[in-house]
């Protein structure tokens, strides 16, 4: 029986380490809609951008901006958080857009629980525990990156492909951006 405990502990520890490597979300809690509600959502996806520091200003550091993806034009990306941010495309080094809430924690718990339950299989757990891990770990990781579009140094093709996930995919010509309100009002600390 001692051997069973070592095997189970090792498998659970291994699965925990793999599952914790899943992608994290940058969106505030309760911002992202459920998967079934994405098509009826009137707000843009949650966009996180990292900008390149200005070479002429050595004191400027890498900056990260996150907020609702409002729109884009030929030269700029518009984000809304506590206010509207206009970020030049040429300064962006990394972009991640998230569209919906993920269930990766639930998937990870099912994988860990199913693997632990194989102890009731006796010596067959040598076969059934790895099968749970072989099916559960890729499923959990796949769930954590589903509907998440990430790239380094985004090009025009990337921007064109994610434009449909903004609040105003048709563009902002003729829209008064000073009157738009965020989905959630951020807490002021």
Image (cartoon, rainbow, N blue to C red):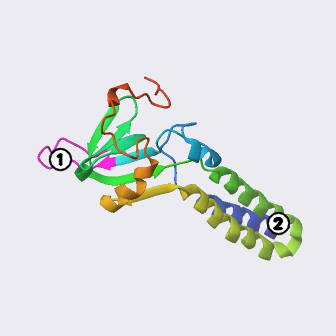
Q: Which SS class for mark 2? A: helix
Q: Position of residue 96 (x, y in %)?
A: 42, 52
Q: Is residue 119 above or below residue 109?
A: below
Q: Is residue 96 left or right of residue 20?
A: left
Q: Please tell me in which quadrant of the rendered image residue 18 appears.
A: bottom right
Residue under numbered circle 2: 118
Residue 155 visible in the current orientation = no
Tell me if residue 67 comes above or below residue 97 in the rendering: above
SS at badge 1: loop
Residue 114, given in percent of the width and then of the height, sits at 78, 61
At 34% across and 44% down in the image, what residue appears? 171
* Depth check, front residue: 13 or 147: 147
The disc at residue 30 is none
Tell me the number on the disc at residue 54: 1
Please check the rendered image and state whether residue 2 is part of the magenta-colored stretch, yes or no: no
Q: Nearer the viewer, residue 29 or 170?
A: 170
101 to the left or right of 47: right
- In the image, the segment drawn in magenta is 50-63
């Amino acid at each position: 029986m001692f051997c069973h405990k070592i095997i189970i502990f090792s498998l659970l520890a291994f699965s925990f380490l793999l599952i914790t490597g899943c992608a994290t979300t940058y969106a505030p809690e309760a911002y992202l809609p459920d998967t079934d509600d994405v098509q009826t959502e009137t707000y843009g996806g949650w966009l996180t951008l990292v900008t390149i520091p200005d070479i002429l200003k050595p004191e400027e550091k890498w900056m990260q901006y996150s907020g609702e993806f409002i729109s884009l034009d030929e030269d700029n990306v518009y984000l809304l958080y506590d206010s509207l941010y206009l970020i030049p495309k040429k300064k962006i080094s990394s972009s991640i857009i998230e569209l919906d809430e993920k269930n990766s924690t639930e998937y990870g718990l099912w994988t860990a629980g199913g693997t632990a339950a194989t102890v009731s299989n006796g010596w067959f757990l040598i076969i059934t525990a790895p099968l749970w891990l072989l099916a559960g770990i890729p499923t959990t990781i796949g769930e954590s990156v589903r509907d998440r579009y990430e790239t380094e140094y985004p090009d025009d093709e990337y921007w064109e492909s994610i434009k449909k996930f903004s609040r105003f995919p048709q563009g902002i010509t003729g829209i008064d951006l000073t009157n738009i309100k965020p989905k959630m009002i951020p807490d002021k600390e």
